[in-house]
Image (cartoon, rainbow, N blue to C red):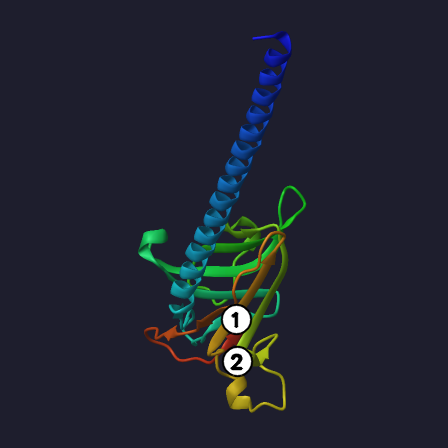
Amino acid sequence: MTLIEVVVALAVLSLVVLVLGASLRGMAQSAQRIDERVDRVDEMRVAVGFLHEVLERVADVRAEPTGHGLLLAASGEELAWVAVMPARFGAAGRYHFRLAVEPTTDGRAALVLRYAPWTGEARFPDWAVAEARVLAADVTEVALRYGGDGVDAGWLAAWPPPPPLPAALRDQPPPRVRLDVATATHAWPSVIVPLRVQSGRGGRGGFVVGGGTR
């Protein structure tokens, strides 16, 4: 082989190596993106499943001898309630729960679920010292809605609903809770969960919203 042929062969081989390297990098990046998407979907699935379980186990809290009803704080930015913790997620029993957006150490926002054991009092605990679990990181928008009539109609930004809705309806817990979450990389499908109240034992009482007796 002449020197020119050797140079040409080396140039062709270099081009082939460059093409193969670019293809391998592209495949690695695609695999990484797929893994990240699978992780996000799996985290969302676990979070939504947990919310379904605890919102379908809301406790009819009757913490004092005089009797108190459902302890619930429901706004567009925060939802706090008392429910039974599923046994596989921790110690079984009644817990205070709060779902809200909180800042993280890096200055970003996250959808955080806080929880603390229910001590029998008809008021919420100090959330700053409660256990916390991040359900969605780097969130850009979170909206909680209540009631609902179908997918898009009848959703309210807070509960109980304001007048002119009937007072009897305002004294009841919302039949459904809707959660919409958007992050910097993706958006969750709308999560609609029926709110089911489990009957407590003993005592009489009314409906408590944000710690005040109705």
Residue 87 x, y percent position in the rendering: 31, 55
Residue 150 x, y percent position in the rendering: 50, 81
Quadrant of the rendered image containing residue 152: bottom right
- Circle 2/circle 1 CB separation < 8 Å: yes
Q: Residue at x 60, y 66 (%)?
A: 143
Q: Nearer the viewer, residue 210 or 4?
A: 4
Q: Residues within 10 Å of mark 2 (few under 14, many from 20)?
A: some
Q: Which residue is mark 2?
A: 148
22 displayed left or right of 86:
right
Q: Residue at x 57, y 32 (%)?
A: 22
Q: Residue 123: which disc?
A: none
| Mark 2 vs 1, N-terminal side | 2
For numbered disc 2, what is the local secondary structure? strand
Q: Where 40 falls versus 95 (above or below)?
A: above
Quadrant of the rendered image containing residue 145: bottom right
Which residue, as the protein is rendered here, is positioned at the far right? 107
Q: Residues within 10 Å of mark 1 (few under 14, many from 20)?
A: some
Residue 110 x, y percent position in the rendering: 59, 52
Q: Amino acid at mark 2?
A: Gly
Q: Is residue 119 visible?
A: no
For numbered disc 1, what is the local secondary structure? strand
Q: Where 178 falls versus 127 (above or below)?
A: below
Estimate the spatial distance between the alpha carbons at disc 2 and disc 1, rounded to whole Å.
8 Å
> The N terminus lies in which quarter of the figure?
top right
Q: Amino acid at mark 1?
A: Arg
Q: Nearer the viewer, residue 203 or 90?
A: 90
Residue 90 x, y percent position in the rendering: 36, 51
Which residue, as the protein is rendered here, is positioned at the far front? 2
Q: Which residue is mark 1?
A: 178
